[in-house]
Image (tube, rainbow, N blue to C red):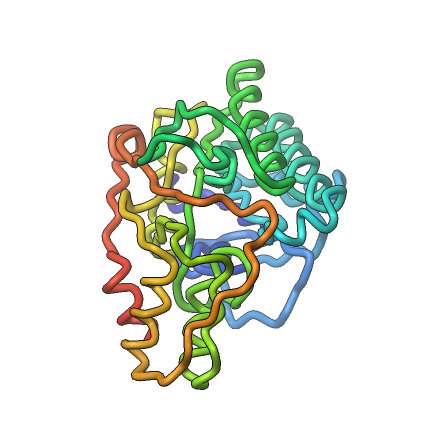
């Protein structure tokens, strides 16, 4: 991209989308989101609308040079409760973005997910691992991921799918997805019980949002298009250990309690980021220890 490009960020008021917006502080950018709260950024053109609306998406994409497609439903549990809504947002919404991008010949960087793999037998997980999603969310992300590849192979559209592992960082809401860190921090800070789903032996690869933003910026420039890339750190942490570390950092007296496992949740996850290093020049910079200390 150059200084005259007009990037479009879908879901630009969300957690990752909002950090992407901040990274373009010196550029004119366009933002599409279903919500339109007041913004203090003078360089942002805001379009309020839903990615499920084809005409809205076409209008947003027109005149853009690259689309960072971050909009979507990110709650695994919610996708289990309402799989039709998850599909319409994550799969059909992404298809709308790709169709609009094909019409205007615009590169698309798609927020995919490690959930496409399910719970593979071998770790760290490579991009060629078997796809066995365990939730409607994972299946919908797999559809979006594969549509991105197909649109490159079939139509020559420049696409890159970034398979995020568990993203965390400042500005994230607590919840059932990667927001577990924010949830633990809030509970520990209030000396409330820290609630761990299941036995806490499940592992996750937590990647800081600033590393994810950098991966998106690199994906907008790479010549290695038509591919999917794992975006994580290559390191994993046990959830019970994470709760203990947060309790220690906050000097909390919270008790760690265990609840029922979540439906559709995988057991272990850790990224192999070799392809991202080679194809994007991606290098995760922020360790989980550094990230937690910064948040606290």
- Left or right position of 107 against 59: left
Q: Position of residue 73 (x, y in %)?
A: 63, 50
Point out residue 272 in the picture as x, y percentages from the top left corner: 30, 35
Percent from the top left, x then y, of residue 288? 28, 59
**Which is more toward the observer, 262 or 163?**
262
Quadrant containing the N terminus in the rendered view: top left
Instruction: In this rendered view, identify the residue nearer to me: 49 or 63.
Output: 49
Q: How many marks?
A: 0
Task: Residue 282 in the image: state x and y as whole percent.
Answer: 28, 40
Query: Image point 49% across, 44% down: which residue?
Result: 266
| Residue drawn at 60 percent across, 53 percent down | 75
Q: In this view, does 286 lie above or below 187?
A: above
6 relative to 98, above or below: below
Q: Is residue 260 left or right of residue 2?
A: right
**Residue that extends furthest to the top in the rendered view of this protein:** 154
Instruction: Find residue 295 and report its image quarter.
Output: bottom left
Res 145 → quadrant:
top right
Give me the residue at 39% from left, 28% from top: 127
Q: Tell me which corner region of the image, top left, top right, bottom left or bottom right, holds residue 87.
A: top right
Q: Looking at the image, which residue is at 53% across and 47% down?
A: 265
Quadrant (top left/top right/bottom left/bottom right) for the C terminus: bottom left
């Amino acid at each position: 991209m150059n200084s005259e490009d007009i990037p479009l960020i879908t879901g630009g008021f969300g957690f990752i989308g909002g950090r992407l917006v901040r990274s373009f502080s010196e550029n004119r950018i366009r933002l599409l989101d279903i919500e339109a709260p007041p913004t203090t950024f003078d360089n942002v053109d805001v379009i309020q609308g839903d990615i499920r609306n084809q005409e809205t998406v076409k209008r947003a994409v027109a005149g853009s040079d690259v689309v960072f497609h971050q909009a979507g439903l990110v709650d695994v549990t919610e996708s289990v409760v309402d799989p039709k809504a998850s599909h319409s947002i994550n799969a059909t919404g992404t298809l709308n973005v790709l169709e609009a991008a094909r019409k205007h010949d615009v590169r698309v960087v798609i927020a995919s997910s490690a959930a496409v793999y399910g719970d593979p037998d071998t770790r760290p997980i490579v991009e060629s691992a078997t796809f066995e999603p365990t939730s409607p969310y994972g299946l919908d992300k797999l559809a979006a991921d594969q549509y991105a590849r197909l649109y490159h192979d079939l139509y020559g559209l420049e696409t890159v799918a970034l398979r995020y592992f568990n993203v965390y960082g400042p500005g994230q809401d607590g919840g059932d997805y990667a927001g577990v860190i924010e949830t633990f921090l809030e509970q520990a800070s209030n000396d409330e019980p820290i609630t761990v789903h299941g036995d806490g032996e499940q592992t996750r690869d937590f990647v800081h949002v600033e590393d994810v933003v950098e991966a998106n910026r690199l994906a907008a420039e790479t010549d290695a298009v038509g591919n999917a890339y794992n975006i994580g750190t290559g390191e994993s942490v046990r959830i019970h250990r994470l709760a203990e570390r947060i309790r220690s950092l906050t000097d909390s007296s919270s008790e760690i309690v265990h609840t029922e496992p979540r439906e559709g949740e995988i057991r272990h996850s850790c990224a192999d980021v070799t392809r991202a290093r080679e194809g994007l020049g991606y290098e995760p910079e922020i360790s989980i220890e550094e990230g937690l200390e910064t948040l606290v």
